[in-house]
Structure formats: C-alpha cells, structure tokens
Image: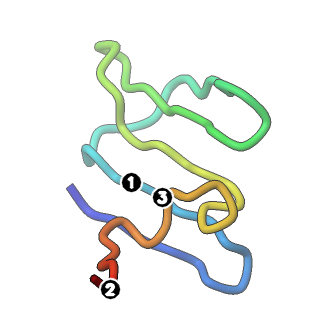
C-alpha cells in the first residue's frame, strides 16, 4: 500500500494495488473507489481529506 497526499488540493489517495483500474465509483461527493477487473479495490481517493478528518492518518494528542 502507498499513500499520497496533495496538500495544495487537500486530496488523499490510498493506493492499494498496482492493477489497472477498470471501474470507478463515487461513494459520495468526496470519496471515490477504483476497482480492478477482478473486483478488488485498486485505490481510494478522498477529496478535502483534512477537512473530512482523513488526514493526517496518524495524529498525536497532547495529554
């Protein structure tokens, strides 16, 4: 798995596979899932990732 984040556009992409994408489905306006021919998930794209709470992936909280 590989994760990329575009800070300027606030877009998080979770790359789960190197397979070719044959189908993309919008789960809602800001979450999009791409599938391979065999039905496995290739990548997940989250728009406005930090605003939605998806980025950063790990956060530390002060005690």
User: Residue at label 3?
Assistant: 13
Q: Nearer the viewer, residue 27 or 40?
A: 27
Location of residue 38 in the rendering, given as x and y in whole percent from the top left corner: 29, 14
Q: Give coordinates of residue 41: x percent, y percent.
A: 35, 29
Q: What is the CA distance from the residue labelled 1 to the residue labelled 3?
A: 4 Å
Q: Work out whether mark 2 precedes mark 3 in sequence or the reverse, and give the earlier one.
A: 3
Q: Which residue is mark 1?
A: 14
Q: Which residue is mark 2?
A: 62
Residue at the image position 71 percent from the left and 85 percent from the top: 8
Does residue 9 sit above or below 39 in this rendering?
Answer: below
Residue positioned 64% across, 24% down in the render: 27
**Which is nearer the N-term, disc 1 or disc 2?**
1
In the figure, 41 relative to 16: above or below?
above
Q: Are marks 1 and 3 in contact (CB under 8 Å)?
A: yes
Residue at mark 1 to residue at mark 2: CA–CA distance: 27 Å
In-front residue for pair 24/61: 61
Q: Quadrant of the N terminus?
A: bottom left
Secondary structure at badge 3 equals strand
Q: Which quarter of the rendered picture does the C terminus lie within?
A: bottom left
């Amino acid at each position: 798995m590989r994760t990329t984040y575009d800070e300027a556009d606030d877009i998080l992409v979770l790359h789960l596979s190197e397979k070719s994408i044959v189908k993309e489905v919008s789960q809602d306006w800001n979450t999009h899932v791409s599938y391979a021919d065999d039905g496995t998930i290739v990548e997940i794209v989250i728009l406005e990732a930090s605003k939605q709470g998806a980025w950063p992936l790990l956060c530390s909280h002060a005690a």
